[in-house]
């Protein structure tokens, strides 16, 4: 059996020792393939949308996120190819926005599909950016659950919070410009739901056999 630098032993019951670059299960291969394909598509979207951005704040955010996403893509692709630790560790994305949300709905025109690229706006572009991160978080979380290679699993798992952080940054930007509006329930209903759960105090020794 072979042993990689992380200390795990790998062997195929039919063919014998498994080298690090082949330390991937079937589900993992297809799932990580989807993750990397989605990452390429996301980077392509950012590249295509960049010339159409009007707001400097959004442009700065797009560029910062693009460079982070590109580095994360390279790290994921590297460890997927080698089955071993990448040359750089996964970084932690820190958004630049504050976390203040404006609650309530402001009347706006109904949304409808655009008919040409000339109609692209910062609202539409930021919506694409948010979609990239929401789909990325779901794909990476799902794939990590099916990943056998410990390095790839860790890289995918570490990437999920970064998708969440970037999505949150975009949503706060959208909210500030009334692109992403956040309704609230009536205070009485909100209070009832928030207080509808109590802590569990079951001790292991009292659990039924």
Image (cartoon, rainbow, N blue to C red):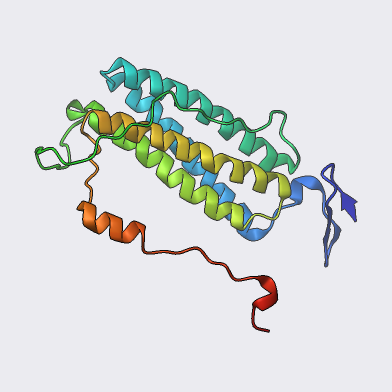
Quadrant containing the C terminus in the rendered view: bottom right
Query: Which residue is painted at 22% across and 56% down in the image?
Result: 188
Q: Residue extending furthest right? A: 1
The picture places residue 196, in percent across and down from the top left corner, at: 36, 64
Whether residue 137 is situated above or below residue 166 in the rendered picture: below
The answer to whether 78 is drawn above or below residue 7 in the figure is above
In the displayed structure image, the side of residue 90 where residue 102 appears, left or right: left
Residue under the image location 64 percent in, 83 percent down: 208
Picture quadrant where residue 59 is located: top left
**Residue at x-position 15% and y-position 36%:** 115
Q: What residue is rendered at 43% in x and 23% in y? A: 96
> Which of these two is toward me, 174 or 27?
174
Report the label total.
Answer: 0
| Residue 125 image point, x, y percent | 29, 30
Residue farthest to the top, as pictured: 56
Q: Quadrant of residue 206?
A: bottom right
Q: Is 7 displayed left or right of 99 in the figure? A: right
Residue 201 lies, in percent from the top left, at 57, 67
In the figure, is residue 2 to the left or right of 46? right
Residue 103: name its quadrant: top left
- Position of residue 51 measured from the top left corner of the image (x, y, whole percent): 31, 19
Q: Quadrant of the N terminus?
A: bottom right
């Amino acid at each position: 059996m072979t042993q990689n630098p992380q200390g795990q032993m790998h062997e195929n019951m039919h063919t014998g020792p498994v080298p690090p670059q082949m330390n991937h299960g079937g589900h993992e291969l297809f799932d990580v393939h989807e993750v990397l394909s989605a990452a390429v598509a996301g980077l392509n979207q950012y590249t295509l949308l960049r010339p159409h951005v009007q707001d400097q704040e959004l442009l700065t955010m797009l560029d910062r996120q693009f460079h982070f996403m590109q580095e994360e893509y390279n790290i994921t692709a590297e460890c997927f190819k080698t089955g071993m630790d990448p040359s750089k560790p996964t970084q932690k994305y820190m958004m630049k926005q504050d976390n203040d949300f404006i609650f309530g709905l402001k009347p706006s025109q109904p949304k409808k599909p655009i008919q040409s690229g000339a109609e692209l706006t910062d609202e539409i572009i930021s919506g694409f950016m948010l979609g990239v991160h929401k789909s990325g978080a779901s794909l990476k979380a799902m794939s990590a659950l099916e990943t056998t290679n410990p390095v790839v699993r860790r890289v995918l798992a570490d990437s999920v919070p970064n998708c969440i952080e970037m999505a949150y940054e975009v949503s706060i930007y959208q909210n500030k410009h009334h692109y992403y509006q956040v309704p609230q329930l009536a205070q009485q209903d909100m209070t009832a739901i928030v207080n509808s759960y109590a802590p569990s105090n079951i001790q292991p020794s009292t659990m039924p056999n």
